Image (cartoon, grey):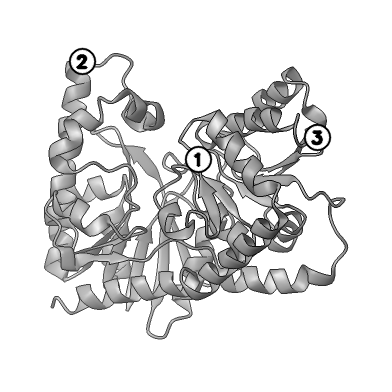
Amino acid sequence: MKVLFTFGGLPHYYNKVLNKLQQEPDLDIVVLAPEQNQQTLGAGVKQAEDGLLFRVIRLPEYNTWYGKAFFRNLSELIDIEKPDIVVTVWPYVLGFIYFPLLWLKLKRKGIRLIFKDIPFMLPARKEANAYYKNPDVLRVNEDYVIPELGVLYGLKIQFLTFSRRLYYGLLADAHVHYIEGAAPLVATYGAKPESVFVTYNSPDTDELFEARAYIADLPTILPPNPHRILHVGRLVKWKRVDLLIDALARILPSIPDAELVVIGTGPEMTTLQDQAKRLDIERHVKFVGGVYKLTDLGRYLNESALYVLAGMGGLSINEAMAFGKPVVCSVCDGTEKHLVREGINGRYFTHGDVVSLAEVINDIITDPLTLTQMGEASTAIIRDEIHIGTVIDGYKKAFQYVIKLG
């Protein structure tokens, strides 16, 4: 069975999932990615092409009449590759709607289409208009923001809602999502509940546990500190590292040796460094830069007491939990609801509230027994419930479902 994925690039973390799928019997994975100047991959996302077990095809991207990127010559590529299944993502799914001859070609050839989505911050269909005019939503949905709310913005909301009715309710044969609440939500746009499959989201946890075992006896990468906080992720506004730095400044008077280690690179690096200096806490904030080797990342996790994600994100939570860390977070990408259990392996703070964040960090990090118990619970959740195997199983179920449609 040949499965063609259309992605905006080759993010290093998702390559591991595709490698696992390629190793499954009777699966042949091919990935279509842009030749250059990717328009759909987030700023600072690390891409990698080493160690790939699947085949990669590059096509040029172009900007369509509806304002989103799509692949040139995709129809001809489908004739050449003859996939059994195409898995697509936003915004490429729009191309199958608004170039109907392409969708008709899939139907004519019996090629099944699967839409991969989280879906995060997706309103029910009847609530979409009010949802996208909510100021709190506008602040984190940059893709939909227009400087002044007006006729153009309203038309954009209607276009988006109409498009979703088409690709959820008509276009896709199945849907793979990261969260359990997806089925009733996408059903409001016309998706059949039986066509929705939950894969969850996970890095290659087999590799994470191997790395954890490997570094157990290695020298420490940082001096011991029982009050060290760790953040991993791209340094972009929606990660809210600024909120975490403000929270650190609030807890330092009562925990004077508290320290924040920030792993990642991105456009906010200088702004965040300036913020630490302005608050006169720069010696308590260590900017490490990007760390992508699992054994190196694991050594930083081993020397940290607590993992905190103050803004949006996802997979860094899985990684921290695999290394036995408690997690503090708020609204991330929806997957945190399955991973972080309040009072069991972590705590939630009030979204965007620095006082709440500081209080939660202070409560956990000053209690060694709680840190230990929550860390053990984190490891158990990744080992027994949400791991690379659950992702692969979800995809296989979706593949089997669409093939049986006949």
Which residue: 13% across, 47% down? 165
Q: Earlier in the sequence, mark 3 or mark 1?
A: 3
**Label located before the other in sequence (3 or 2):** 2
Side of 336 relative to 172 (left or right): right
Measured along the vertical axis of the image, is residue 36 above or below residue 324? above
The residue singled out by tag 2 in the image is 150
Image location of residue 309, percent across then percent down: 56, 44
Q: Residue at x 28, y 63 (%)?
A: 78
Judging depth in this view, the residue of 370 and 279 nearest the camera is 370
**Vertical relation: 79 (above or below) 365:** below
The CA distance from mark 3 to mark 2 is: 50 Å
Dot 3 corresponds to which residue?
256
Q: Amino acid at mark 2?
A: Gly
Q: Report the quarter where the N terminus lies.
A: bottom left
State left or right for residue 304 relative to residue 195: right
Answer yes or no: is residue 235 visible.
no
- Amino acid type at circle 3 is Pro
Kindly identify which residue carries mark 1: 349
Query: Secondary structure under badge 1?
Result: loop
Depth check, front residue: 217 or 391: 217
Q: Position of residue 354 (x, y in %)?
A: 56, 29
Given residues 22 and 62, the one toward you in this image is: 22
- At mark 2, the secondary structure is loop
Q: Amino acid at mark 1?
A: Phe
